[in-house]
Amino acid sequence: MLEPKINQIAAECTAAAIIALFPKVTLIQARHQRFGFSVEATVPKGFSIETFPHIEERIWQLPEPKQLEMMGSNAAEYLRASNQVVRANLAKQEGKNLVSVVQIGDFIDYCPWPLAEEFKGFRLLECEQDGDHVRILGVAHANQAETKAYIKRYSQYKKNDHTHYFEIIDGQICLTPKYEAMRFALICKWRDFVHSQGGEIYDGPKTPSNTFCSKMTLASGSGENGLLDPATYHVCELHHAPKGSVKKFLAAFDLEITEKDQKYYASDAFGTFWCIGSEKMCYASLERVLALMIENNCQELLC
């Protein structure tokens, strides 16, 4: 299972190792992704995938990471002093607000995400390069055995990635007739579910009282993970739902459901878990459920 906190600290350590080996590197981004983590930077000539063994070796020699809090303006000064102008500009936007930074020896980075204390399994996967712009993909786990198992299946994970089946134009997801039909089938299943439980479908701001009812609303997200987390997505809200009905509804999609803190999760092709519902939502994101079904080869249920 991929943990965001573990892959975030691995991303920061990778960035620290790269900058230690290539001092003229300008860091653009280091963050966890659903497949593991990515590090984007501008690098000097001569950087290639052949440097991966040197980066991986350097990572295990790094000092222990520390996560600190400081004002955004102060973090920006530290980053600018380290010639990390891109990261400094991000921190500067926070002004006097407290921000989180990670420090690894002489390396410092603006890091708004929580970090794990350590990782044992680690591997750099790919290098995407366009001129002096480089994007490095990697993965980390709590132990080496998980990473080894992940590497063996990585090619298959990529084949199951739902983003191969969609085109993005001007930030909008374009669905083919086949997948639009599947999306519509998910909407129909939601409506049938509500009606089968004696509920009502409603629209508008006024919620019917003391009766099971549901409506579909449009929510906003970060849009950073493709169809699993688009900029806008549809949520199916529930009010006064019969106890246990949502879990039974989601189980019908053949996804392996994990329950935690009264929320239901399912994993994508890479092993990252996503919330798909709760006692107050039968779809935390309708588009996300569609993508997860594609990645878990469950889409035939909608055809």
Image: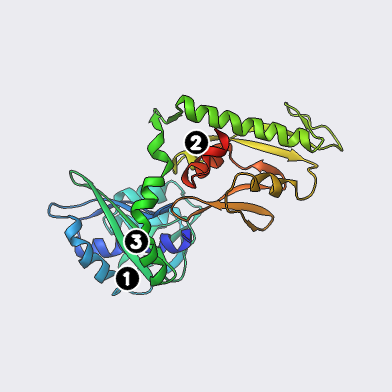
Relative placement, left or right, of 48 versus 152 is left
The residue tagged with tag 3: helix, strand or loop?
Answer: helix
Front-lying residue, 141 or 28: 141
Closer mark to the observer between disc 2 and disc 1: 2
The residue tagged with tag 2: helix, strand or loop?
Answer: loop
Q: Disc 2 designates what residue?
A: 231
Q: Residues within 10 Å of mark 1 (few under 14, many from 20)?
A: few
Q: Position of residue 255 (x, y in %)?
A: 57, 49
Relative placement, left or right, of 6 versus 47 is right
**In which quadrant will I find the C terminus?**
top right
Disc nearer the start of the sequence (3/1): 1
Q: Residue at x 49, y 45 (%)?
A: 297
Measured Cα–Cα span from mark 3 to mark 1: 29 Å
Disc nearer the start of the sequence (3/2): 3
Disc nearer the start of the sequence (2/1): 1
Q: Residue at x 56, y 51 (%)?
A: 266
Q: Disc 1 designates what residue?
A: 105
Q: Position of residue 87 (x, y in %)?
A: 35, 51
Q: Residue at x 58, y 53 (%)?
A: 256
Q: Which quadrant would residue 139 be assigned to in this image?
A: bottom left
Front-lying residue, 293 or 90: 293
Compared to residue 216, the image places residue 244 above or below, namely: below
Q: Disc 3 designates what residue?
A: 151
Q: Amino acid at mark 2?
A: Ala
Q: Amino acid at mark 3?
A: Ile
Measured Cα–Cα span from mark 3 to mark 2: 30 Å
